Amino acid sequence: MNNLKYVVVEGPIGVGKTSLTRRIAEHWGTQTLLELPQENPFLEKFYRDSGRYALPTQMFFLFQRMNQLRDLAQADMFSGPVVSDFLLDKDPLFARLTLDDDELNLYRQLYEHLRPQAATPDLVIYLQAQPETLIERVKKRGVAMEAGISETYLYRLCESYARFFYHYESTPLLIVNTEHLNPIGRDDDFDLLMSRIKNMRGKREFFNLGE
């Protein structure tokens, strides 16, 4: 594992971060730390009426993620490696996308108070895909709660992720284009990705498999 103790797989909805997180953890024989969107009672309502439910949705996720990270730290997370499908540092991305100014100020105060309690990953793997690809993937998997996600929201979300990771410098970052790479469904692609992770030397690298 190249001494990687805490690895995060990130990317917008539909890009496959949770599935890849599980596969990497199984391959390495490590534990996972996963988002639990099904436990957020506001999320489905947010997809139907974002203006009304953005703040409680955001706050629930912030506290949920912090509790997960805090529990892991108290259990001595670094006694064994962990692969996670969420990066706390990107949490404000959603806040800026969905909250009005007063709500955003309230959120920022809480985030800045809680953020120092979270550990920093050894590596972040950012999965990219075009919005059109994500739209098709979300439709294909047919999760009822996601039926209310608009194409406009997904486009804005992709732009926000790209902007965030363009400036991200907190940890080593591997940017993976998943348009023609399927490390979840194709063993050869997964092996290529694992090799790329193993041989990563720079602070920021790109993995783009052509057609």
Image (tube, rainbow, N blue to C red):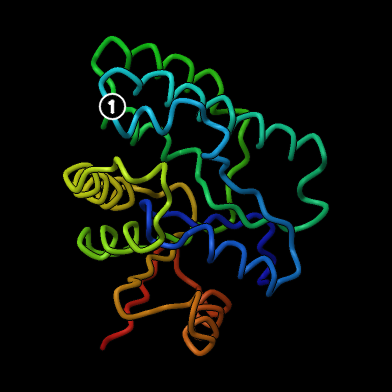
Residue denoted by label 1: 50
Quarter-wise, where is residue 181 in the image?
bottom left
Instruction: Mark 1: give few (<14), some (14-19) or many (20+) Cα within 10 Å.
Output: some
The answer to whether 174 is drawn above or below residue 83 in the figure is: below
User: Residue 139 at what x, y percent from top left?
Assistant: 31, 58
Give 15 or 210, whichever is nearer the viewer. Answer: 15
32 and 80: which is toward the camera: 32
x, y percentage for residue 64?
59, 29
Q: Can you say which quadrant of the picture contains the N terminus?
A: bottom right
Residue 87 at x, y = what percent? 50, 45
Q: Is residue 183 above or below residue 202?
A: below
Is 119 left, or right, of 156 in this rendering? right
Q: Quadrant of the C terminus?
A: bottom left
Residue sitting at 42 percent across and 26 percent down?
58
Callout 1 secondary element: helix
Which residue is rendered at x = 22% and y = 42% of the image?
153
- The quarter of the displayed image where residue 122 is located: bottom right
Residue 172, percent from left and from top: 48, 59
Which residue is farthest left? 152
Q: Amino acid at mark 1?
A: Ser
Horizontal arrangement in the rendering, residue 47 relative to residue 79 (left or right): left
Q: Is residue 140 left or right of residue 51?
A: right
Q: How many numbered badges does the structure rendering display?
A: 1
In the foreground, 186 or 162 = 186
Q: Residue at x 37, y 51 (%)?
A: 13
